Amino acid sequence: MSDFKNRLRNLIKETKKTQKDIAKEMTIASKIEISPQTLSYYANGREPNYDTLIAIAKYFDVSVDYLTGYSDAKKPENTLTIQELGLTDVSIDIIKRLNKITASDPPDLEENSRMFIDIFNDLLESRYFISFLQAIKALTNPNEGDLSWTPWTDGCVNPFDFELMMKQAGWEKVLKESVEGILEDVYRNGR
């Protein structure tokens, strides 16, 4: 459980609450006495017993596997998606939220939620999407010239054409053209 203390520290920090407040709330919720000092021990490397580990996981709404470092998925329902797609819990939650916009959200979000999902799908399905990602990667990591990470599929710019475009036009232009291509694809799909 070497990841436990680091993950617990991060979870505590994310709550923006004191360890005293967290310990009090956790004790009330779990019926297991957890003092601020005990919580501090855990955050500094002491391993909790099984019942306390479950109480900590429930309090922070994460899985025991996440707390102990066996999974990067904070929420158990995201485990397969993270393993298969490499998305983070935050990314998955954003996508889920787009699909579950409610009346309590601003009116424009509720009215447009289906359109947002359709546009998101069009973006991912666009033949320019890989070029767009490459341009962003190149702009944010200018010293990395390796393009071999890209999973090329039919309809995407191949790596050799992309490198030629990069040399001839520069990344800024490639990014602009990729975004324009994506927008054309979205427009063509009637969104």
Image (spheres, helix red, strand yellow):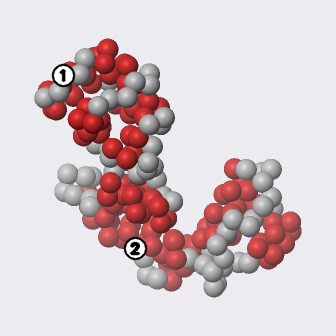
Q: Amino acid at mark 1?
A: Glu
Question: Where residue 34 appears, x then y in whole percent?
Answer: 23, 22
Tell me where residue 149 sits by quadrant.
Answer: bottom right
Question: Where residue 187 appears, x then y in whole percent?
Answer: 50, 78
Question: Where residue 108 appears, x then y in whole percent?
Answer: 30, 59
Lateral position of residue 147 relative to residue 38, left or right? right
- The tag earlier along the polypeptide, 2 or 1, is 1
Q: Residue furthest front?
A: 49
Question: Where residue 29 appears, x then y in whole percent?
Answer: 15, 32
- Residue placed most toward the observer, 82 or 17: 82
State the count of labels: 2
* Secondary structure at numbered mark 1: loop
Residue at image x 57%, y 73%? 182
Q: Amino acid at mark 2?
A: Asp
Distance from the alpha carbon under mark 2 to that under mark 1: 48 Å
Q: Residues within 10 Å of mark 2 (few under 14, many from 20)?
A: some
Q: Residues within 10 Å of mark 1 (few under 14, many from 20)?
A: few
- Residue placed most toward the observer, 89 or 119: 89
Q: Residue furthest top?
A: 37
Q: Is residue 75 above or below residue 168?
A: above
Residue at image x 39%, y 58%? 79
Q: Is residue 55 above or below residue 142?
A: above
Name the quadrant of the N terminus.
top left
Lateral position of residue 15 relative to residue 140, left or right? left
Please indicate, yes or no, whether residue 55 appears anywhere in the rendered image. no
* Secondary structure at numbered mark 2: helix
Q: Which residue is mark 2?
A: 118
Residue at image x 37%, y 58%? 78
Lateral position of residue 99 relative to residue 72, left or right? left
Q: Is residue 106 above or below residue 147?
A: above
Q: Residue 33: which numbered mark, if any?
A: 1
